[in-house]
């Protein structure tokens, strides 16, 4: 009898150990930023767990410390993340430092074609070196800087009349930056429904990447270029071109004339707060914020409209790319399961579901679907914005390059030190030194 | 009848030998045995990282380039740090922050301690209320002061507007180049003055009543008692408070990052914020190591000189 009990206990213990081992092997940790799309991904991933039995764990970090936390994780060779939805600019460093798994063979084996995704997202989120067929990520979350506006305010007859009398054109979503500034000035300090409101909320954050994302979003359409298209890393006359100087001057003018008081250190969250609380008429922000506005109790439904980044003085029109690709971390001990997740995520029905839940799919079959544009009030603006994107450097030294632009832009735009020309000349000097240090110049 | 034990018993002579061996150790050896774990820990978490940092400061190592060759650059990083305008700018910002926070904290802290030391009703309650700010987390303090400084809804702006009549939304404490350095001084003073007050209070309560009684007998005025008894006897405590706050504020990071992020521009970019950006945002590991060593030597040197002065005051 005793022997029987002993045997049963041993068997039970073995079974428990085996099941624990099994569960451990089938746990995948996905690292990303803590924001609305991450919640949608948690919901979406339940289907993956149901299909494969692989349990998904999530490590989400707020945007302001996202890069700090996860770049530290990658650089220190940590084992926390199996899958990383890293920022688009990390791709160069992560590829060259072998922190991400190269996905070309895996894509070929599983018939995942990059031609099936929006071209800008493939270049922005997956390729390193850029414009070469070397893939380190699957485009996961399309995102771009664009604008929201208070449709209900814009449609008030008395405001429309006053605006037309003052500026000579109908109050409507701006198509040029000059128009945008005029609308900002028009609303600045105006009283609406007994409350003082302001023109626009723009990015000014100093610590991570805020002011660079905002300023670049304007500078591109004014003629700023990172480098000579014919000679890589040749930046003289491109970074500090006359157009770029005008663009930076414009950004400062917009900050000075049309933002709410105390907007000296604002990024995505501050923009969301300013818009949802009815403080501003227009708001610059990444498109990921749009589903949240659409369903918001204060500004949701017909109260909010969406528009693409306006044109610059010469008719050029670009927008700052956001968004990320999903990569397998080279240090992961669960690479097979991680690749299985990417394979599952790349399916068109999963991508369609991703869009429905609030994520921004980059798959052509989803965005080119005839019903896509009418599926959400912001779908068309998103699609048009994705067609005009440009991105910041994705070099291995991107973090240094970014900190240099953060300092130069904040010094000029917010602190009001020096001129736009001096800021861009200084930036050219900083970036040249960084590329020299990298041996690229 | 003999009794055989079922289990063997240890030989008493052997036990004695072990005890004998233990008791034969010298006091010095026993002391080393007790201290050894602490020393090992100290070496592992303090001395080794320091030596490693010094080693890194002499190379071009960058943490985000694990496969790049590491070159020995000698003192180049030190030269670069000392000739960097940005470094000197942040040193200046730190000096401003350090001087004014110490000035206000000592002044207000001592005044509060002097008042609290007087016996009055509700004395303990007021002490508890005054020390509340220092019990909060710096991140929390930084966060809620950003709301207090908010030009449209901030109580601080309304308070200033109430007394001056200016429009509360016409100035931004953390967005204005000339106001931001003072904004961080105000918050740190609000938070840490109670700490200085407590130390001063301990000093005031340590002064024997008999000294004041003797001074009364000698017909010394209150003013004279204050300058010849109170101040000299509290001075070592005040100096200690200055030392603690000085070291803390030299490495100030969390509160200021939460409040201003080092901005506007780099107006409030203190050395610790600048160092963090070099080390963990730009990934200039070698350069940042040299920077850290320079800061360490500066604080260590200044603190040593200060402690000597403190001891002299105590021994007077």
Image: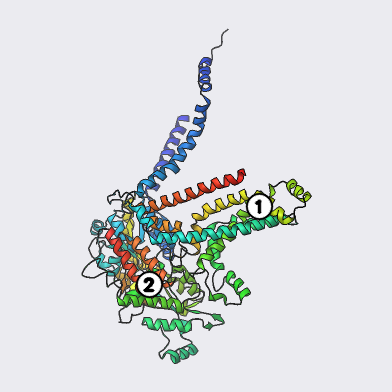
**Residue B133 horizontal/vertical position (percent):** 60, 58
Chain assignment, label 1: B
Q: Give above or below for B225 relative to A429.
A: above
| Closer to us: A432 or A373 | A432
In the picture, the disc for residue A215 is: 2
Q: Give above or below for B304 relative to A66.
A: above
Q: Quadrant of residue B86?
A: bottom left
**Residue B245 horizontal/vertical position (percent):** 55, 53
Q: Quadrant of residue A252?
A: bottom left
The answer to whether marks 2 and 1 sit on the same chain is no
Residue marked by disc 1: B231
> What quarter of the picture does the C terminus of chain A occupy?
bottom left
**Could you say whether the residue bearing mark 1 is in a helix, strand or loop?**
helix
- Farthest residue, direction left: A230
Mark 2 or 1, closer to the camera: 1
| Closer to us: A168 or B261 | B261
Total number of numbered discs in the rendering? 2
Q: Residue at x 51, y 46 (%)?
A: B304
Res A279 seen here: yes
**Could you say whether the residue bearing mark 2 is in a helix, strand or loop?**
helix
Q: Give above or below for B304 relative to B97.
A: above
- Farthest residue, direction right: B217
Q: Is residue B28 left or right of residue A314?
A: right
**Residue B221 horizontal/vertical position (percent):** 75, 55
The CA span between labels 2 and 1 is: 55 Å
**Residue B301 horizontal/vertical position (percent):** 47, 48
| Closer to us: B77 or B70 | B77
């Amino acid at each position: 009898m005793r022997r029987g009990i002993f045997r049963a206990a041993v068997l039970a213990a073995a079974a428990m150990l085996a099941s624990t081992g099994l569960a451990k092997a089938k746990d995948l940790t996905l690292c990303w930023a803590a924001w609305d799309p991450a919640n949608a991904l948690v919901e979406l991933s339940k289907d993956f767990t149901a299909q494969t039995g692989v349990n998904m764990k999530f490590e989400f970090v707020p945007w302001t410390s996202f890069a700090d936390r996860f770049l530290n994780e990658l650089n220190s060779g940590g084992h926390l993340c199996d899958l990383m939805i890293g920022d688009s600019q990390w791709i160069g460093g992560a590829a060259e430092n072998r922190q991400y798994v190269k996905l070309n063979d895996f894509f070929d084996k599983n018939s995942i074609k990059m031609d099936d995704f929006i071209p800008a997202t493939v270049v922005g989120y997956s390729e390193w070196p850029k414009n070469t067929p070397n893939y380190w990520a699957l485009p996961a979350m399309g995102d771009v800087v664009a604008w929201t506006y208070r449709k209900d305010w814009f449609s008030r007859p008395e405001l429309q009349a006053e605006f037309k009398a003052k500026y000579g054109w109908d109050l409507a979503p701006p198509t040029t930056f000059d128009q945008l500034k005029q609308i900002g000035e028009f609303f600045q300090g105006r009283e609406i429904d007994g409350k003082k409101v302001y023109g626009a909320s723009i990015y000014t954050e100093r610590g991570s990447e805020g002011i660079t994302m905002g300023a670049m979003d304007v500078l591109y359409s004014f003629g700023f270029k990172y480098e000579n298209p014919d000679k890589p890393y040749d930046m003289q006359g491109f970074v500090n071109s006359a157009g770029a100087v005008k663009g930076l001057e414009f950004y400062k003018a917009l900050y000075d004339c049309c933002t709410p008081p105390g907007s000296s250190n604002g990024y995505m969250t501050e923009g969301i707060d300013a818009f949802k609380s009815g403080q501003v008429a227009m708001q610059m922000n990444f498109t990921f914020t749009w589903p949240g506005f659409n369903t918001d109790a204060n500004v949701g439904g017909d109260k909010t409209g969406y528009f693409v980044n306006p044109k610059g003085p010469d008719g050029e029109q670009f927008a700052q790319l956001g968004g990320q690709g999903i990569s397998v971390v080279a240090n992961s001990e669960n690479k097979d399961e991680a690749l299985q997740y990417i394979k599952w995520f790349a399916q068109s029905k999963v991508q369609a579901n991703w869009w429905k839940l609030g994520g921004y799919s980059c798959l052509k079959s989803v965005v080119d679907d005839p019903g896509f544009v009418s599926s959400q009030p912001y779908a068309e603006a998103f699609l048009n914005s994705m067609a005009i994107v440009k991105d910041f450097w994705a070099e291995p030294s991107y973090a240094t390059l970014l900190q240099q632009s953060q300092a130069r832009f904040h010094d000029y735009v917010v602190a009001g030190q020096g001129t736009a020309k001096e800021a861009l000349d200084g930036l050219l000097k900083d970036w040249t030194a960084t590329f020299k240090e990298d041996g690229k110049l | 009848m003999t009794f055989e034990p079922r289990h063997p018993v240890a030989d008493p002579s052997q036990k004695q030998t072990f005890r004998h061996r233990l008791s034969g150790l010298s006091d010095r050896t026993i002391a080393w045995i007790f201290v050894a774990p602490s020393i090992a820990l100290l070496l592992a978490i303090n001395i080794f990282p320091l030596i490693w940092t010094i080693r890194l400061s002499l190379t071009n190592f960058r943490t985000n380039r694990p496969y790049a060759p590491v070159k020995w650059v000698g003192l180049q990083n030190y030269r670069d740090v000392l000739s960097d305008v940005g470094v000197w700018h942040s040193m200046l910002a730190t000096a401003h922050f350090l001087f004014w926070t110490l000035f206000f904290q000592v002044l207000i802290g001592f005044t509060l301690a002097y008042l609290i030391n007087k016996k009055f009703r509700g004395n303990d309650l007021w002490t508890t209320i005054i020390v509340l700010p220092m019990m909060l987390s710096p991140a929390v303090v930084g966060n809620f002061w950003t709301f207090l400084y908010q030009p449209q809804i901030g109580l601080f702006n309304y308070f200033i507007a109430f007394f001056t009549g200016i429009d509360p939304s016409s100035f931004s404490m953390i967005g204005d180049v000339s106001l931001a350095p003072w904004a961080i001084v105000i918050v740190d003073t609000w938070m840490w003055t109670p700490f200085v007050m407590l130390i001063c209070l301990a000093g005031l309560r340590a002064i024997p009543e008999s000294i004041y009684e003797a001074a009364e007998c000698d017909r010394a005025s209150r003013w004279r008692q204050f300058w010849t008894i109170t101040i000299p006897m509290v001075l070592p405590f005040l100096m200690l408070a200055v030392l603690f706050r000085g070291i803390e504020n030299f490495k100030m990071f969390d509160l200021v990052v939460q409040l201003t992020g080092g901005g506007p521009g780099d107006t409030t970019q203190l050395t610790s914020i600048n160092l963090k950006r070099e080390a963990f945002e730009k990934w200039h590991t070698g350069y940042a190591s040299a920077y850290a060593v320079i800061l360490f030597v500066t604080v260590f040197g200044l603190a040593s000189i200060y402690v000597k002065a403190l001891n002299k005051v105590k021994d007077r």
